[in-house]
Amino acid sequence: MDARSQAAKTGAVEIVVADGVKNFLSFCRLPRQLYKGMEGFAPPLDAERWTLYGARLNPHFKLVDWQGWLALKDGKPVGRIMAQIYKPEVPAPLGASRAQFGCLDAIDDDEVVAALTQTAEGWLQGRGEKLIYGPFSPSINGELGLLVEGFNSQPMVFMTWNPPYLVAALERLGYVKARDLISYRYDVTQKDREARPSVITRPEWRDRLKIRELRLNDMAEEAKIIIDIFNDAWADNWGFVPFTLEEFMSSAESLRYIMPPEGGVMIELDGVPQAFAVVLPNLHEITADLGGRLFPFGLPKVISRIRKHKFTSGRLLLFGVRRALQRKAVGGAVILAFIEEIRRRSADSSYSNVEFGWVLEDNMGMRRPIELAGARIDKVHRIYEKSLAA
């Protein structure tokens, strides 16, 4: 983290920069300490958080200037926040400000939330920013939004969770809705397991649409295709910032160890890749009892469990269809072909449900096929905005 300052005090709340090893580790593990035992929360692994927020490990932090803070009461961490600004040479988020906040977590205390947000706002104002959006934790291509619906829903891997009181506290501070992000739950039925593909067997698509697994043994080349499709597919969506190949490759190697071969799908039209999907097993099923700790005893358990565990849930982590196909019959056919492929694979899978998330609330071209397939809204995350002009 690039800035160093003396601790600032707001009433009984002390705000300190989250620099140094001790504060960084505290910043990463704070949510599991604050929300332990709350219904709907499952602690992420500390080691995974280190790679997400470590500036030397996550290439995202090359694109922004940023700073993180901890809130202390009586010397004890009770909250955290980060602020960031995309650098001038990086494309600005589509339709949104370069200035963002993220990683907002706190105890049920308006004074703590106010001290955190005021610190982030002041840091951004000092750099000439007049509008703030968030939470982005740390980017739109990572974990984002504040949970506003679905607090008691099944915890899902790489999805943010926060208690309801945090929503109310933020809104009392003048933050208003910018966009909602919708996550769907699809429950796999026996009918799904017995279903047969129909879209790709139709005469007009039979020889044109092909579905294959991702080539995990050639991820370097496969990643180039994925990034090209993803950035093209999402280019018109609010908040879009291009996903860099370096960002994707920083996590691609780990995907090989946690994603079964059938979890990656590439859809080709007339021999050209036009869409892809990555479905991850819900790792919370095998890590929830570890309390976020991987070392020293958690790692052997995770390795053993990931090989033997029959996962019952998963998440559609990444999905993209090229813009040329969107809002056209062929685009709808590609999405439905993918859903049918998920159904087909469910015959040999232990999954009982899959989460499709997230989807922008106004992206009806994506939402309609998902809803027509029988999925239901399970969670809603919200991106907030606030004017800093005053």
Image (cartoon, rainbow, N blue to C red):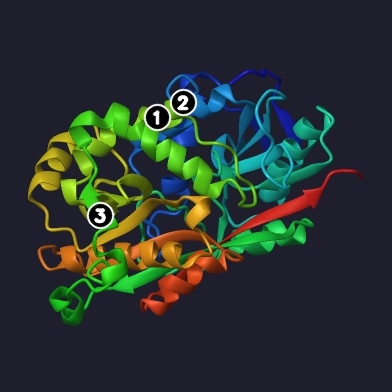
Mark 1: secondary structure: helix
Kindly identify which residue carries mark 3.
210
The alpha-carbon separation of the residues under discs 2 and 1 comes to 5 Å
Looking at the image, residue 226 lies above or below residue 203: above
Task: Pinpoint residue 184: horizontal percent, then vertical percent.
Answer: 42, 68
Mark 3 surroundings within 10 Å by alpha-carbon count, few (fewer than 14), some (14 through 19), many (20 or more) = some
User: Which picture quadrant has residue 58?
Assistant: top left
Residue 223 visible somewhere in the drawing: yes
Q: Amino acid at mark 2?
A: Gly
Residue 141 visible somewhere in the drawing: no
Quadrant where the image shows the N terminus = top right
The label nearer to you, 1 versus 3, is: 3
Do callouts 1 and 3 mark residues in contact (Cβ within 8 Å)?
Answer: no
Give the camera-side residue of 218 and 27.
218
Kindly identify which residue carries mark 2.
54
Mark 3: secondary structure: strand
Do callouts 2 and 1 mark residues in contact (Cβ within 8 Å)?
Answer: yes
Kindly identify which residue carries mark 1.
51
Residue at the image position 60 percent from the left and 44 percent from the top: 240
Residue at the image position 43 percent from the left and 72 percent from the top: 369
